[in-house]
């Protein structure tokens, strides 16, 4: 499970890459069993060449010293770290690896912002990465990058479609599971079941009322037409 801080770093890095006109995706498996990079960006330069950047996100010292393989195979490679962690591990970072420092926006800055901020914080360059030749076959890397982008698009479409994708029996099991968390008999408006039933009843009443109003309008129109037939002098008044 990702911590809140990890998610904040991830969303801030995404915005950082986006503002540099780079295509970016998280958790990309590398060709030739080179591991999984936390974030990979692809940017086409003015001369037509492609620049690949790899980012590894770390939030604790234990995380930094994890045995998981570091997939620094890009042209430029960076650690993305909170300031405090950087101070603790900066002497362990290889010369050619860059560092981006994450800083969270304070509440006052958020309140005074003219528009909604698209990230919880911002990144500053503490150490520039040195260029290196791509460490894997570029065609294979592009294929892995596209596959990861498709995964994210598929996830987004599933979220957009929401509960339509789930069969009734699965939804029923999920509702039963949530029922075990407790039912507040003193505050029924806090319970999802009561809210659901109330909404369904309100929807049903509204639908019936609309149907009744439509039937009544048809009845009134028919009544007037019958009166017109019985009294031709009323013609033109309908």
Image: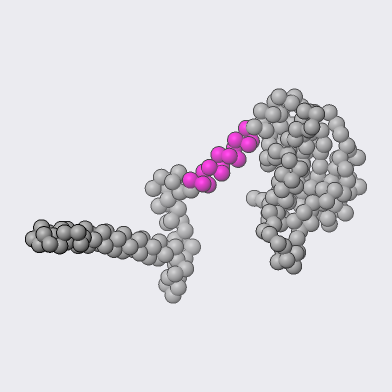
Q: Nearer the viewer, residue 236 or 109?
A: 236
Q: What residue is drawn where x is 62% and y is 32%?
A: 147
- The image shows residue 34 at horizontal and vertical percentages of 74, 31
In the picture as drawn, the residue positioned furthest to the left comes out as 230
Residue 72: quarter of image: top right
User: Does the stretch in magenta take in 12?
Assistant: no
Residue 23: quarter of image: top right
Residue 132 vertical placement versus 109 (above, below): above
Q: Nearer the viewer, residue 69 or 214?
A: 214
The count of marks equals 0
Asked whether residue 219 is in view, the answer is no
Q: What residue is drawn where x is 37% and y is 65%?
A: 198
Boundaries of the magenta span: 147-161
User: Does the stretch in magenta take in 160?
Assistant: yes
Q: What residue is drawn where x is 71% and y is 32%?
A: 30
Q: Nearer the viewer, residue 61 or 11?
A: 11
- The image shows residue 64 at horizontal and vertical percentages of 79, 47
Asked whether residue 106 is in view, the answer is yes
Question: Is 135 left, or right, of 155 in this rendering?
Answer: right
Residue 64 vertical placement versus 111 (above, below): above
Question: Is 201 left, or right, of 108 in this rendering?
Answer: left
- The image shows residue 47 at horizontal and vertical percentages of 80, 29
């Amino acid at each position: 499970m990702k911590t809140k801080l990890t998610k904040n770093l991830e969303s801030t890095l995404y915005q950082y890459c986006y503002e540099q006109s780079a295509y970016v995706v998280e958790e990309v498996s590398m060709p030739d069993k080179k591991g999984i990079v936390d974030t990979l960006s692809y940017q086409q330069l003015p001369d037509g060449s492609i620049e690949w950047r790899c980012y590894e996100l770390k939030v604790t010292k234990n995380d930094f010293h994890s045995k998981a393989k570091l997939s620094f195979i890009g042209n430029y490679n960076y650690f993305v770290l909170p300031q405090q962690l950087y101070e603790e591990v900066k002497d362990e970072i290889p010369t050619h690896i860059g560092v981006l420092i994450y800083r969270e926006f304070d509440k006052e800055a958020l309140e005074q912002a003219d528009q909604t901020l698209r990230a919880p914080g911002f990144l500053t360059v503490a150490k520039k990465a040195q260029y290196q030749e791509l460490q894997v076959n570029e065609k294979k890397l592009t294929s892995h990058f596209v596959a990861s982008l498709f995964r994210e698009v598929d996830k987004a479409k599933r979220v957009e479609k929401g509960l339509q994708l789930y069969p009734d029996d699965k939804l029923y099991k999920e509702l039963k599971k949530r029922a075990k968390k407790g039912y507040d008999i003193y505050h029924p408006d806090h319970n999802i079941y009561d809210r659901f039933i109330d909404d369904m009843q309100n929807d049903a009443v509204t639908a019936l009322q609309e149907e009744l109003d439509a039937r009544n309008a048809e009845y009134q129109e028919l009544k007037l037409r019958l009166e017109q037939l019985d009294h031709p002098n009323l013609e033109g008044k309908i």
